[in-house]
Image: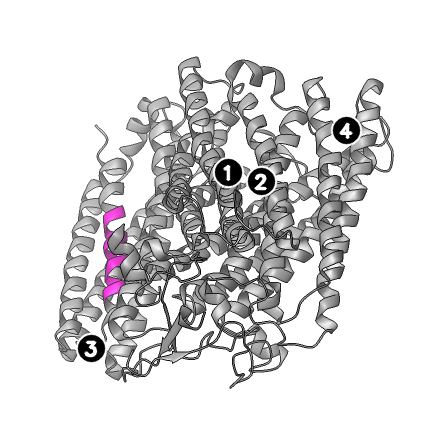
Amino acid sequence: MADALSTTATGHTAHLHGDYLDDPPGLRSWLTTVDHKRIGLMYLWSVTFFLIVGGLFAMLIRLEHLTPGRTIMDAETYNRVFTLHGIIMVFLVIIPAIPAALGNFAMPLLLGARDVAFPRLNLLSLYLYWTGALMALSTLFMGGVDTGWTFYTPYSTTTGGGVTMIVLAAFVLGFSSIFTGVNFIATVHKLRAPGMGWFDMPLFCWGIYATALIQILATPVLGITLLLLVMERVLHIGIFDPQLGGDPVLFQHFFWFYSHPAVYIMILPAMAVISEVIPTFSHKTIFGYKAIAFSSVAIALLGFLVWAHHMFVAGMSIYAGAIFSFLTFFIAIPSAIKVFNWIATMWQGSIELRAPMLYAISFILLFTIGGLTGLFLASLATDVHLHDTYFVVAHFHFVMASSNLFALLAGLHYWWPKMYGRMYNETLAAVGCVLTFIGFNATFIPQFVLGSRGMPRRYFNYLPQFQALHVASTIGSWILAAGLFLALATLLASLRRPKGMVDNPWGGKTLEWMTSSPPPTYNFEGQPLPQHGPYDYRPVPVPLGVERHQG
Amino acid sequence: MSEAITTVHAEPEHSPFLQHHFQGMGQQFDASKIGMWLFLVTEVLLFGGLFVGYAIMHAKHPEAFMQAHHHLSRPLGTLNTVVLLVSSFTMVMAVWSAQTSKRKLLILFLSLTLLLACVFLVVKGFEYNHKFAEGLLPGKFYTHQGDTIPGQFMFFSFYFMMTGLHGIHVLAGMGAISWLLRRALRGDFSSVYYGPVDLVGLYWHLVDMIWIYLFPLMYLIS
């Protein structure tokens, strides 16, 4: 502290060195970089690419359902399209989107660190992601995959096409996810700025930390499950094949032991972004810091105890069903705690409805709908009626797809000035948000109605009485696509503006706003020392030591 | 807001092995140790899936598993258990030698560990060879004649998957130990910097421990 330096947050810090975008220059330096910010951006654009690919498949599915029977493709093609839509969106978009893209970019900055704990492992994780992505896409030339993203046995062990390849792709992607998780946990433990205790961390880091816990505890089980599936296909080892003395339901248990916690890999980082955006644009300290922090960890741990609620009708004792049902209700509590805390943060705050805040509020609305409809599926009796219908499709698109997408966009609009040092056109960004919000609801609310009336999911054909709602949903998908396209175009258009004009456009209090935008290669000039809590918007911030002393 | 942040320019510790983003050797060591423990957790869960699958299939087909395990050689299994246990001891001694800057002892103990790993794989190779000769193979390749109880192929499916995955881990461990040996010959390690030896040691103990579970599970059903 002897030679402490001060930087002013409103003025521009001097650009002593080049920023991380140009220093060192060249494509080769990007591909061999170990800088967390560059790796984050490469993840971001890879995820965006696959979001567009997976989104196009979604548009094709909706277009096919414009009329009953064949509209634009035959039933076989339809099965392959919805399978690839699911696999791309789950493994290549939603799981890496926020942790690997925004987490990589923002978390070390928020902690006041120079990089993540294992920078080379971080780069390896990106290359594994690319390898897995290429493997997944290569199945397009192997006759496609028609199992759905869940790979249920015995169908997945008997059908043809590229099942083995795409399962191995998911295995490789799992390792990419594990390496990210290991990296982030070690980073949070060891690379916080001096003086930053666990409860002085921004909540984004808590959310990413909880996510990383799930990534390392659940993903290896998926890895071994997928290997067993490959062995079953190649060697007929018998574990999942009833004809050989195996048990196909065992596959479902194994699969959901990962894949249910995986939905929290999708939602926890989304909640983490929202916990940053809400206080910044309410200009108010977050309400219930510890409640939000602990509820993230509670969700991560409880998430391991509810997997069998995907299998209420798959053949399970009713006592097991009752216990899993109860635990599923139970996990709604920490989620609700977060929602109430965000609302309490906004209450009596000085709310600025700028683009990231609009996305954050949309997130809260959509997540609430998604969360509450989950309770219908958690109840044993209603689940028998709703299982495998469009109600389920609409529910998980609300909780996984919409929440993740809106939080990703909230975070992207929030940190875009930090990433590129440029501000986008805020009016267009707001229009993009509103369009996306309308489009999303128009697409999926009709599907709740369809499902409750008995329209099964994954079916190619449907009865004529469902057509009106299917048409509404398809039109909604066009609005949704238009909104997302506008949002992307608005962000990209900002790259034509001059760089380095905005160091802290939102008046944020966390450490990433205390360096220049875009940041220098090693993030900060010297080692930053946080002087007050991450959300201290009081006129005279209270120093960290004093606050901790007072409890 | 100027009081919002102050920065210090930490005095860098001068070690050629200190990476730029750490503030000192202690922080770097602690971080890498956490990373290794987390990696070991994922390894336990990876094998855990196989152990659960084995347990469930064993419970479904107890007679077949009992009958099948008589084809395994208990003496060779016991020998390999002893070999791995001793290799864990030599690995511990290697870590100790690094911590106390005893370069020659470090090279000796790393070489011994490597040698014992080789012995393990050679013994395992003899066992595999015997199974191949008798057609005791996984899944559809099971061609053993004269079984009185059906379903024994499932035992060998698990036998080969679990010992095979373990064998791959032994190979990976040998690669890591060879890398340590090269660096030890170069004189990289000392009481100031011994992190990699410590971490590979942890990994090697895990590989050993998995075998400690595999051995009674496969060879000693009764």
**Subunit bearing disc 2:** A
Assess whether mark 2 and mark 1 are in contact (beta carbons under 8 angstroms): yes
Q: Which residue is at 42% across, 51% downward?
A: A212
Q: Which residue is at 49% across, 25% downward?
A: A309
Whether the magenta-drawn stretch holds residue A126 is answered as no
Labels 1, 3: one chain: no
Q: Which residue is mark 2?
A: A364
Main secondary structure of the magenta stretch: helix
Assess whether mark 3 and mark 4 are in contact (beta carbons under 8 angstroms): no
Q: Which residue is mark 1?
A: A339
What label does residue A254 carry, if any?
A: none
Residue A34 image point, x, y percent: 48, 72
Q: Which residue is the extreme one toward the front?
A: A539
Marks 4/3: CA–CA distance: 66 Å
- Position of the N terminus of chain A, as image quadrant, is bottom left
Q: Which residue is mark 4?
A: A460
Assess whether mark 3 and mark 2 are in contact (beta carbons under 8 angstroms): no
Marks 1/2: CA–CA distance: 7 Å
Front residue of A384 and A440: A440
Amino acid on which disc 2 is placed = Ile
10 Å neighbourhood of mark 4: few (<14), some, or many (≥20)? some
What label does residue B192 carry, if any?
A: 3
